[in-house]
Amino acid sequence: MAITIDTDKEQDIEDLQYDIDDSRKTDRWSDAPADLKELFHVLEWNIIDGEHAKTNSLIEPALAKGVSPRTLIAGPMAKGIAEVGRRFKMDEYFLPEVMMSAKCMQAALATLKPLIIAEKAEEIGTVVVGTVQGDLHDIGKKIVAMMMEAAGFTVVDLGVSVPPEDFIAAIRKHKPKIVGFSALLTTTMNMQWETLKIIKAEGLREAVKVFVGGAPISQAWCDKIGADAYASDALVAVDKARACIFKYGAIKGGDPQLHANMLVIDAEREAMKAKATATAG
């Protein structure tokens, strides 16, 4: 029997700056049985500490207890990698530590991907994703791609260090509804802007909704370069992608109204979180 655990309410992860004993004192995963709550905390710290050899020994028991792959990805895995991203931004972690944490994610995703794909819903459109030129990091992009596939999208993953001309070729070949640019490094985030400029120059901007994401990316950056949507995590990316198809499919890429509608989704999500927090308090 599947176990339902609310990953959306677990937003406070300040304890992950300290140690697992601090994590155990939190109310995070309070709707999970005690043994699963402990397992989730251990999995968070497994990713933060980069103990990739032990990752599947945590994933498999959770699956055996009825935890869904999506819960694992959106829950403890996402929380752990979010803390890794924070440490990287604050120069507490450097690329070697990030890569060790990425190995943990890759080990887990290798186990979870077949299960996620098996849950795939009805086909609703094509999404092209890629890490921009000069950037070789793709763990966040892979998570987004997997969750998009589970939501019913056909995903064309162009890989890492993707030059603008490859995005252009993919748009012409696959005719996607959405194109997503990922970047982990501040030194490569400008390639999102450069790639978007070339899409415009090629006359393809109205044909696609452009999403941006990655550790250094923010809503302010999305606003600045004229992308349609900023996705802070994979679940947000899926929510906005589905809205682009089912609610705003008639609005063309680059339309200011589409950008405004994506901001409304963020505002509604924050309002729901605040309400849930107030209710719990």
Image (cartoon, rainbow, N blue to C red):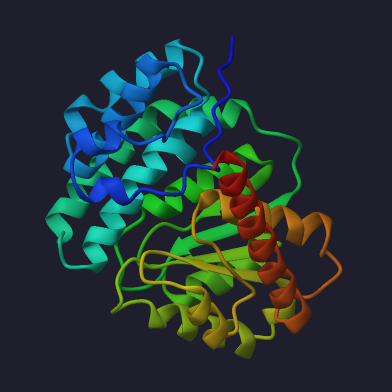
Q: Is residue 170 above or below residue 236?
A: below
Q: Is residue 52 visible to us here?
A: yes
Q: Is residue 97 above or below residue 130?
A: above
| Direction from residue 139 to residue 5 in the image, left or right | right
**Between 161 and 69, the one nearer to me in the picture:** 69
Specify the quadrant of the image occupied by residue 255: bottom right
Q: Is residue 175 visible to us here?
A: no
Image spot of residue 63 (x, y percent): 44, 17
Residue lying farthest to the bottom in this orientation: 201
Specify the quadrant of the image occupied by residue 180: bottom right
| Direction from residue 212 to residue 124 in the image, left or right | right
Image spot of residue 167 (x, y percent): 53, 70
Which residue is depicted at the point 29% across and 60% down? 86
**Between 145 and 262, the one nearer to me in the picture:** 262
Image spot of residue 42 (x, y percent): 26, 29
* The N terminus: image quadrant: top right
| Direction from residue 145 to residue 111 in the image, left or right | left
Which residue is depicted at the point 31% across and 77% down? 186
Which residue is depicted at the point 67% across and 46% down? 153
Residue lying farthest to the right in this orientation: 250
**Between 141 and 92, the one nearer to me in the picture:** 92
* The C terminus: image quadrant: top right
Image spot of residue 123 (x, y percent): 74, 41
